[in-house]
Image (cartoon, rainbow, N blue to C red):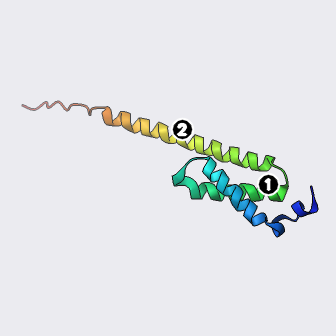
Amino acid sequence: MSEGANSGFAKGGHARVLASAALFAAAHGEPVQFLGLFFLGVVLAVLLWRTKRIIPSVITHVSIQRRRDLSALVYRGRATDSRVAEKQTPPRVVSTSR
């Protein structure tokens, strides 16, 4: 790597990180989540810049993705349970008094 590339933010690094984060957020195609994805893109880009390796950024991204998938799975299970509970009819009360 050249010395200019190693100087980090001194030579336009901020713009590169922001551009990378914007591309990262746009590539996910989630307009509602753009700001959160942009922030994550900044974190991943800075992690890449600081470590000079892509593996920590990839591991971080995969970890966040799996946590999100697990949360969705757990939430989906709860939603299914509540829908089943709504469909069940309460037991009929039989009056023994006449």
Separation (CA) of disc 2 from disc 1: 30 Å
Disc 1 secondary structure class: helix
Q: Nearer the viewer, residue 49 or 96?
A: 49
Amino acid type, residue under disc 2 in the picture: Leu
Residue 28 % position (x, y) = 61, 47
Residue 55 % position (x, y) = 80, 46
Residue 69 % position (x, y) = 59, 41
Q: Residue at x 46, y 40 (%)?
A: 78
- In the image, taking residue 40 as reference, residue 32 lies left or right, namely left
Q: Residue at x 48, y 37 (%)?
A: 77
Disc 2 secondary structure class: helix
The quarter of the image holding the N terminus is bottom right
* Number of numbered labels in the structure image: 2
Say whether disc 2 or disc 1 marks the residue closer to the N-terminus. 1
Q: Mark 1 packing: few (<14 Cα in 10 Å), some, or many (20+)?
A: some
- In the image, taking residue 14 as reference, residue 77 lies left or right, namely left
Q: Nearer the viewer, residue 40 or 34?
A: 34
- The image's mark for residue 48 is 1
Q: Residue at x 14, y 32 (%)?
A: 95
Q: Mark 2 packing: few (<14 Cα in 10 Å), some, or many (20+)?
A: few
The quarter of the image holding the C terminus is top left
Residue 67 % position (x, y) = 62, 45
Check disc 2 and report the residue beneath it. 73
- The image's mark for residue 17 is none
Amino acid type, residue under disc 1 in the picture: Leu
Q: Residue at x 43, y 39 (%)?
A: 79
Q: Going by the picture, which residue comes out furthest to the left? A: 98
